[in-house]
Image: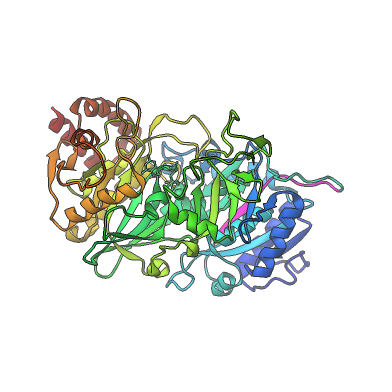
């Protein structure tokens, strides 16, 4: 550190040399008016939320305690995948699925963007820990940001502040995560409610374990502990250290006899993770408890089983479609307050509303763009990717072991996507490699969670397409190797689910939501060897009688249609998979080509 007093450093609450040096460097580059070290206290939360209300970024909700509505700039509403880069030293390490730029070139570009970018603003330094601070090797990070919205949201999403900083001591490693809205204020210039820049970069430097983000204030682009650290950077750490960082929910399922199974599931953004994680079973005697709704870190335990841990501390859930009918546990969590809502509508009595919350919309709302809204309006009241940000501890069915640093032993892994055709309601993989093939070929129709066209089928391997921090071919290989290194009898069994198959009239074939407990029941009964299945070319699918549909009101034909494997649909899938695999050249593990050959021969 230099001897010149840098503002914010003379009273820094740490002597961590690397941290102080990095903060000093960023202060010098970005020239904020002041530096605040975030302590995570209630007083700080009150001060910052007051400030956000004052600035017009937040509207205080009269109907929910300590809760706020943020309406973003209409251009800054989702992750920006085309502006997201993996800047590995070698381009091959970013692979065909990521944007890449040489690290030095990217740093040169972004250094010029960062120069003076916090002028007129406050720099916040947020020490945080992904996963419990009490872990054997706590996973620290420090986010620098000029956004109060980010500070307030990070407090919900991660373990932040003094506790994390103290545990970092003087020399523990941490991931530096630099964020700026890219909207400096000149003297006398009035601020806008949602500052951001039309130039955006979301950048990971995998070898340095470092994140640089610029121009966006939106969740996945700005809350850097989440996708940037816990998936993109962590997936690289996991590759190097022999574990898995995945876009998965974690749930605890207890059957009527009291037997417990933990299940992890990977679905692409806006395809049902938060819903499944908080599911209320419709079948008597079954119980679901939540451990995580978006990210799982999985390592082998001493007993040879795969243990999963949720690195986050909050829920950042898709609002539209979340209602008392579909996800009552999310509604109960939200109702306790302490939440930030982004881009939903405001009711006249100071509450939030979005499409799907209640069957009857209120007669009048203020929509997410601040305009009057009535049920006759042409546009939905809320942005399709609007979100609630709520402490996970408010989840009424939170499993008590959610913050056990050891994690929980996983019995089954589900992959799933949004497909109108082809993919049956549920299929069990024949073995681990077949399961990896299911993950590697996972496909889904695009949603509003990222900018771009909605409803287009794309491959989204392991629901990680936007989040794999290295070459996806190497990532598939890491999954294959993970299976090889383990005792096969202790590995989780892999399943592929599809809640989104349609009938000829375009309606969903499967009612979904709480009824998905029927599929979980079959999954668990398969693990226990008590449920019947037919062996199809694509894996084991329930017999019509093996799936518990009692009281569901579906005809036998409807159940058959949900479970059907149509060879002609699958034959049409084969050239798409071939084209997909061809992208990876030598990096694709040969086992994936072998699995494709098995599929082809079974379809013949
Ligand atoms: P991210 O948080 O973006 O990673 O997404 P997510 O996987 O958590 O998605 P979420 O659970 O929030 O689901 C988003 C959308 O899927 C909502 O519109 C839900 O209504 C819909 N959805 C969830 N589960 C089901 C289901 O079982 N059936 C149907 N038809 N829709 C569902
Ligand atoms: Mn997600
Ligand atoms: Mn979610």
- Say if the magenta span includes residue 185: yes
In this view, the residue in front, 368 or 353, is: 353
Quarter placement of the C terminus: top left
Q: Is residue 327 left or right of residue 338?
A: left
Q: Position of residue 321 (x, y in %)?
A: 47, 43
Is residue 526 placed above or below 576 in the rendered structure?
below
Which residue is depicted at the point 56% across and 64% down?
A: 128
Q: Quadrant of the N terminus?
A: bottom right
Residue 569 is situated, as x and y percent measured from the top left of the image, at 24, 27
How many numbered dots are placed on residues in this image? 0
Relative depth, front residue between 539 and 177: 539
Can residue 6 be spotted in the picture? yes
- Specify the color scheme: rainbow
Residue drawn 31% across the image and 52% down it:
282
**Image quadrant assignment for residue 562:** top left
Quarter for ligand 1? top left
Residue farthest along the right direction in this orientation: 188
Question: In the displayed structure, would residue 15 be above or below residue 223?
Answer: below
Q: Is residue 183 magenta?
A: yes
Residue drawn where x is 78% and y is 66% of the image? 4
Give the quarter of the image for residue 194. top right
- Residue 574, image x and y in percent? 25, 28
Tell me if I can see residue 236 in this picture: no
Q: Which residues are magenta?
A: 175-187
Depth order, front residue of 551/514: 551
> Horizontal placement of 184 versus 166: left or right?
right
Residue 345 percent across, percent down from the top left: 61, 43
């Amino acid at each position: 550190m230099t001897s010149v007093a840098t503002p914010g450093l003379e009273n820094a609450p740490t002597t961590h040399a690397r941290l102080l040096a990095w903060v000093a460097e960023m202060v010098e580059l970005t020239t904020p008016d002041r530096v605040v070290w975030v302590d995570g206290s209630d007083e700080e939360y009150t001060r910052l939320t007051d400030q956000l209300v004052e600035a017009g970024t937040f509207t205080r909700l009269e109907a929910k305690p300590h809760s706020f509505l943020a309406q973003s700039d209409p251009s800054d509403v989702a992750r920006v995948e085309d502006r997201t880069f993996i800047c590995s030293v070698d381009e091959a390490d970013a692979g065909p699925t990521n944007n890449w730029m040489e690290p030095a070139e990217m740093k040169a570009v972004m250094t010029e963007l960062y120069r003076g970018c916090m002028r007129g603003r406050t720099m916040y330094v947020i020490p945080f820990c992904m996963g419990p601070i009490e872990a054997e090797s706590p996973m620290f990070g420090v986010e620098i940001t000029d956004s109060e919205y980010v500070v307030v949201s990070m407090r919900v999403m991660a373990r932040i502040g003094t506790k994390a900083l103290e545990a970092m001591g003087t020399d523990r490693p941490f991931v530096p995560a630099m964020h700026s809205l890219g909207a400096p204020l000149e003297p006398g210039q009035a601020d806008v409610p949602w500052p951001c820049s039309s130039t955006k970069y979301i950048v990971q430097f995998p070898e340095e374990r470092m994140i640089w983000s610029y121009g966006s204030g939106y969740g996945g682009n700005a809350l850097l502990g989440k996708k940037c650290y816990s998936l993109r950077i962590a997936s690289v750490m996991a590759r190097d250290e022999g574990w898995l960082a995945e876009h998965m929910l974690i749930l605890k399922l207890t059957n009527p006899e009291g037997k417990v199974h933990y299940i992890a599931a990977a679905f692409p953004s806006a395809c049902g993770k938060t819903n499944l994680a908080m599911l209320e079973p419709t079948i008597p005697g079954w119980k679901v408890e939540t451990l995580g709704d978006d990210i799982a870190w999985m390592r082998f335990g001493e007993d040879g089983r795969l243990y999963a841990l949720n690195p986050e501390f909050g829920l950042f859930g898709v609002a539209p479609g979340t209602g008392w009918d579909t996800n009552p546990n999310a509604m109960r969590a939200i109702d306790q307050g302490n939440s930030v809502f982004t881009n939903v509508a405001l009711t006249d009595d100071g509450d939030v509303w979005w499409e799907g919350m209640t069957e009857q919309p209120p007669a009048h709302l203020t929509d997410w763009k601040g305009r009057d809204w009535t049920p006759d309006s042409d546009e939905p009241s809320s942005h399709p990717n609007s979100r609630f940000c709520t402490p996970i501890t408010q989840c009424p069915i939170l499993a008590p072991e959610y913050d056990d640093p050891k994690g929980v032993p996983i019995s089954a892994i589900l992959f799933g996507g949004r497909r109108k055709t082809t993919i049956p309601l549920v299929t069990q993989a024949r073995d681990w490699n077949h399961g990896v093939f299911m993950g590697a070929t996972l496909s889904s129709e695009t949603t509003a969670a990222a900018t771009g066209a909605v409803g287009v089928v794309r491959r989204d391997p392991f629901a990680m397409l936007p989040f794999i921090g290295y070459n996806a071919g190497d990532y598939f290989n890491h999954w294959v190797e993970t299976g090889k290194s383990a005792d096969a009898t202790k590995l989780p069994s892999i399943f592929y689910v599809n809640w989104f198959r349609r009938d000829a009239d375009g309606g969903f074939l499967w009612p979904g939501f709480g009824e998905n407990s029927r599929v979980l029941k079959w999954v668990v009964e398969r693990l226990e060897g008590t449920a019947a299945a037919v062996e199809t070319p694509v894996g084991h699918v329930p017999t019509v009688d093996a799936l518990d549909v009692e009281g569901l009101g579906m005809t036998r034909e409807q159940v058959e249609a949900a479970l059907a494997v149509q060879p002609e649909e699958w034959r049409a899938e084969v050239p798409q998979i071939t084209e997909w695999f061809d992208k990876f050249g030598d990096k694709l593990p040969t086992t994936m080509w072998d699995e494709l050959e098995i599929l082809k021969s079974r379809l013949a």
